[in-house]
Image: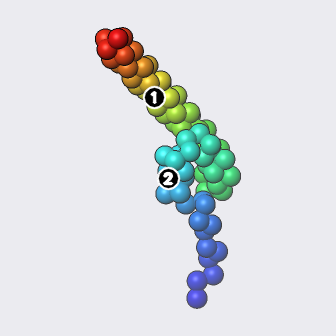
Amino acid sequence: MNNKPQEKWYFKTSVLVIAFLCIGPFALPLAWLNPRFSPKAKIIISAIIIILSYFLGAVLFNSLQSIIRYYKMIFQGSL
């Protein structure tokens, strides 16, 4: 018989990765509440998630600015 307690589904690494991809930095509590990660690992994971979120936000902002400029050009040219 297996006496080892089964790991909760929300503590699996795959769930953490999927949560980050879906909700970004709002997944940080999953990393901080995970008992498998050491405090050092939690800090590293948090830093990675925050840095990636910042850069992805910057890319999104730049993309939206480009789209806005493009549409302004289109609508100014058609008048």
Q: Is residue 44 visible?
A: no
60 w.r.t. 35: above or below:
above
Tell me how far mark 1 sits from mark 2, CA to CA: 20 Å
Q: 53 or 34: nearer the eye?
A: 53
Q: Residue at 38% across / 20% down in the picture? A: 71
Residue indicated by mark 1:
60
Instruction: Pinpoint residue 23: horizontal percent, then vertical percent.
Output: 56, 45
Q: Nearer the viewer, mark 1 or mark 2?
A: 1
Q: Is residue 23 visible?
A: yes
Tell me the kind of residue under disc 1: Leu
Q: Residue at 53% across / 57% down in the picture? A: 15
In contact (CB < 8 Å): disc 1 and disc 2: no
The numbered mark, 1 or 2, whose residue comes first in the sequence reads: 2
Q: 79 or 25: nearer the eye?
A: 79
Q: Is residue 66 left or right of residue 17?
A: left
Q: Residues within 10 Å of mark 2 (few under 14, many from 20)?
A: few
Q: Secondary structure at mark 2?
A: helix
Task: Say how many tags the image has.
Answer: 2
Residue indicated by mark 2:
18
Instruction: Pinpoint residue 60: horizontal percent, then vertical percent.
Output: 45, 28
Q: Is residue 63 left or right of residue 14?
A: left
Instruction: Pinpoint residue 19: horizontal percent, then vertical percent.
Output: 54, 50
Q: Secondary structure at mark 1?
A: helix
Q: Residue at 59% across / 65% down in the picture? A: 9
Q: Is residue 39 left or right of residue 65?
A: right
14 w.r.t. 63: above or below:
below
Tell me the kind of residue under disc 2: Ile
